[in-house]
């Protein structure tokens, strides 16, 4: 992949979902499930993203069951490379945060590191 830029969270989850062949509604459900309900794709957002990802060659539509009108999609090699580049970018972000904050990557450690790093100002007040 010659281009290198951050994926949106929606695109990240769409690509991740398409590591196995899925139809649109399945992508929406899996994205919501993987994100713990935090990311909910509306149909318009999803189908716009699918069109863009298809134009980039990152996904492709595949023939589904001949008795079904649903279109199914799967990730391409180029899409997998884009996804893997994003995972590497996210790992770098986490590793840098761990180095600076002295954490092991867990949210609890990060919260403790931030709490422990508060400075006390003159008069006994905490600086956040």
Image (spheres, rainbow, N blue to C red):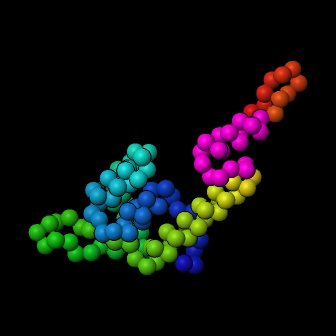
Query: Is residue 101 toward the left or the right of residue 27 in the image?
Result: right
Measuring from the top left, give residue 7's x and y in whole percent: 52, 62
Residue 51 is at least partly visible in this image: no
**In the rendered image of this protein, does residue 110 appear above or below residue 94?**
above
Quarter of the C terminus within the rendering = top right
Picture quadrant of residue 65 = bottom left
* Residue 122 x/y as whole percent: 88, 24
Say which quadrant the N terminus sits in.
Answer: bottom right
Question: Residue visible at 71% across and 36% down?
Answer: 115
Tell which residue pokes out farthest to the right in this image.
122
- Which residue is most to the top? 123
- Residue at point 27%, 56% (across, down): 25
**In the picture provided, is 21 more to the left or to the right than 79?**
left
**Residue 26 inside the magenta-drawn segment:** no
Left or right, 122 with respect to 64, comes to: right
User: For this view, does 125 lie left or right of residue 46?
Assistant: right
Q: Residue at x 73, y 56 (%)?
A: 99
Q: Is residue 102 magenta?
A: yes
At x 59% / y 67%, what residue is drawn? 88
Secondary structure that dominates the magenta span: helix
Query: As rendered, which of 113 and 18 lies closer to the eye?
Result: 113
Which residues lie in the magenta part? 101-118
Q: Find residue 79 and report its image quarter.
A: bottom left
Closer to the camera, 72 or 116?
116
Image spot of residue 55 (x, y percent): 40, 73
Horizontal and vertical percent position of residue 31:
38, 54
19 and 107: which one is in front? Answer: 107
Above-or-below relation of 49 to 64: above
Front residue (pair 58, 18): 18
């Amino acid at each position: 992949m010659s281009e290198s830029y951050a994926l949106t969270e929606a695109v990240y989850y769409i690509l991740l979902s398409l590591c196995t062949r899925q139809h649109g509604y399945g992508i929406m459900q899996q994205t919501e499930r993987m994100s713990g309900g935090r990311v909910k794709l509306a149909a318009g957002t999803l189908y716009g993203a699918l069109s863009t990802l298809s134009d980039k060659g990152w996904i492709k539509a595949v023939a589904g069951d001949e008795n079904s009108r649903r279109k199914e999609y799967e990730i391409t090699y180029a899409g997998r490379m884009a996804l893997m580049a994003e995972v590497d970018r996210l790992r770098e972000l986490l590793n840098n945060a761990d180095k600076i904050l002295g954490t092991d990557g867990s949210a609890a450690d990060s919260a403790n590191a931030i709490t422990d790093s508060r400075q006390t100002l003159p008069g006994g007040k905490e600086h956040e």
